[in-house]
Amino acid sequence: MGSDVGKLKSELKEKVLKLFKDFMTRLAKLEELGTSGSKLLTGFKQGLEFLRRPPIDRTSELIENVVKSNETKRVKSYFESGCLNVHDSVQNMSKLRTSLLGLTDHLCKAKSILKELECLLEDVSSAIQTATECLPPAWDNDFSNGLDLQATNDEEDIKSSDLQEPEMTEIAAMMGIIYSMLKKDYAMQEKIVISLNLKSLSVELESYCLMWSLHPFINDEIMHRAWRLIP
């Protein structure tokens, strides 16, 4: 009986660790996507701010003298167009479109990865539940502690003594917490992308870029701890 229990524990550990590694691999891909998305958002901000760039103030005596002393046909045309170079304007409009399309694509890819993470989380929960049903009562109680993964939204739960032994429930709970944080981060990114338009205020765009790069819903300490769990 002891050997059977030991074998079951060993098989469970191997399966959970594999699922956890797959989970973290997809997490790394999601982080890479987030970095690319941040660059696209910054590109949108820069493109829009260029189009809003105010014209040169010709009320300044110094500026007026410089303009008059170099008033070529090209300079005159530049001022008549509102101090905007047509070629640059076209390029920046293209940049805005490319950025928006890229951010929309980012959301699709991120959502797909989140779905994969959810499936892996369900697989881990199912594996431990199956083991719980097969193990003796003493082990059943240990494995049952902390298995309500979807309800584990409080990051403080990871510090619970119930998640320290056995190791597999700690990993399962860790995955549940990380998934919950990532869903909130994605929801924030989605709201940012949906709100982007040509009327977006500069102060809003600045805040969006800052929030995107800071990942306010992600607890770095928990993320570092998760990576350390990989043998």
Image (spheres, rainbow, N blue to C red):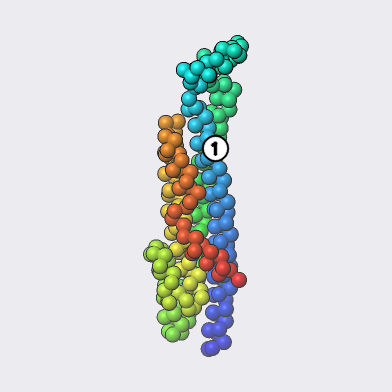
Q: Is residue 31 above or below residue 206?
A: below
As drawn, the residue found furthest toward the bottom would be: 1
Camera-side residue: 192 or 108?
192
Question: x, y (%) of residue 91?
Answer: 58, 27
Q: Is residue 93 above or below residue 106?
A: above
Camera-side residue: 218 or 69?
69
At a point 44% along the width and 85% down the height, the residue shown is 138
At a point 42% along the width and 44% down the height, the residue shown is 191
Name which quarter of the figure residue 198 lies in: top left
At a point 45% along the width and 48% down the height, the residue shown is 211
At a point 54% along the width and 37% down the height, the residue shown is 43
Q: Is residue 147 visible?
A: no
Q: How many marks?
A: 1
Q: Is residue 74 left or right of residue 50?
A: right
Camera-side residue: 53 or 190?
53
- Residue marked by disc 1: 43
Which element carries disc 1, helix, strand or loop?
Answer: helix
Question: x, y (%) of residue 216?
Answer: 44, 53
Answer few, some or many: residues within 10 Å of disc 1's Cα (few below 14, many 20 plus, some between 14 and 19). Answer: some
Question: x, y (%) of residue 65?
Answer: 55, 15
Q: Amino acid at mark 1?
A: Gly
Q: Is residue 109 visible?
A: yes
Quadrant where the C terminus is found in the figure? bottom right
